[in-house]
């Protein structure tokens, strides 16, 4: 059997969504239907009765929101693709949550704010420019594909920032801080590229 003919048996067929829009899958990424679980440390277990989301920093009003208050706030559904720095991508994720732009409005973000830092379980942090955090597709999400977030995927709340590699969509969210100047987070201090643009393959410094 010719080599090329034999290799065809091992090639995965091109996903029709990629065939229809080749630019949808960033360079270096592999499409998966699964949602791989990747994180540093153990999965926390929260009591949502006592859990609070702290919103602070360059704001007029510091907030401390309960899980129920977030559920009761006007929500938005975002359908998006997610891209992990470890090279997997998953298409057509349905997230529901509170738009970060609405959270910024609730807190009265000051004109001096330029960045948003996410504070999470065990001291994990990451940040993005304010424009990404207040875009139409940016959420603090509590639901994925019709069900509450699983503990391993960030329950009770995670950030969702589809335009960045997915480590920027921080899990187990405990605080949102609006900053006048940027701060490097956990993975950024350990070699990940702070810009994190999947289409430019900004994986590492």
Image (cartoon, grey):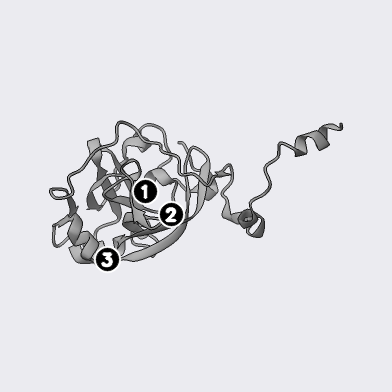
The x and y percentages for residue 201 are 53, 43
Q: Which mark is residue 13?
A: none
Q: Residue at x 62, y 54 (%)?
A: 18
Q: Which mark is residue 162?
A: 2
As drawn, 16 above or below 75: above
Label 3 close to label 1 by CB (< 8 Å): no
Label 2 close to label 1 by CB (< 8 Å): yes
The x and y percentages for residue 23 are 61, 55
In the shown orientation, is residue 67 left or right of residue 42? left
Residue marked by disc 3: 102
Count neighbours of disc 2 (C-alpha within 10 A) and say few if under 14, some if 14 to 19, many if 20 or more. Answer: many
Gap in angstroms between the C-alphas marked 2 and 1: 8 Å
Label 3 close to label 2 by CB (< 8 Å): no
Q: Residue at x 70, y 40 (%)?
A: 11
Q: Disc 3 or 1, which lies upstream in sequence?
A: 3
Q: Residue at x 39, y 54 (%)?
A: 161
Q: Secondary structure at mark 1?
A: loop
Count neighbours of disc 1 (C-alpha within 10 A) and say few if under 14, some if 14 to 19, many if 20 or more. Answer: many
Q: Residue most toward the front?
A: 147
Q: Is residue 118 visible?
A: yes
Q: Secondary structure at mark 2?
A: loop
Q: Which mark is residue 169?
A: 1
């Amino acid at each position: 059997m010719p080599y090329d003919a034999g290799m065809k048996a091992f090639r995965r067929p091109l996903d029709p969504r990629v065939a229809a829009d080749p630019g949808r899958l960033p360079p270096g990424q592999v499409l998966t239907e699964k949602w791989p679980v990747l994180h540093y440390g153990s999965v926390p277990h929260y009591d949502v009765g006592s859990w609070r989301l702290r919103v602070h920093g360059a704001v007029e009003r510091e907030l401390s929101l309960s899980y129920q208050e977030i559920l009761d706030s006007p929500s938005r559904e975002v359908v998006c693709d997610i891209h992990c720095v470890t090279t997997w991508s998953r298409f057509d994720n349905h997230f529901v949550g509170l738009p970060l732009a609405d959270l910024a409005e609730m807190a009265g973000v000051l004109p001096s704010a330029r960045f948003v830092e996410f504070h999470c379980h065990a001291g994990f942090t990451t940040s993005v420019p304010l424009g990404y955090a207040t875009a139409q597709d940016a959420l603090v999400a509590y639901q994925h594909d019709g069900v509450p977030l699983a503990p391993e995927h960030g329950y009770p709340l995670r950030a969702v920032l589809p335009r960045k590699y997915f480590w920027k969509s921080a899990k187990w969210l405990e605080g949102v801080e609006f900053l006048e100047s940027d701060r490097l987070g956990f993975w950024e201090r350990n070699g990940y590229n702070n810009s994190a643009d999947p289409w430019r393959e900004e994986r590492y410094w």
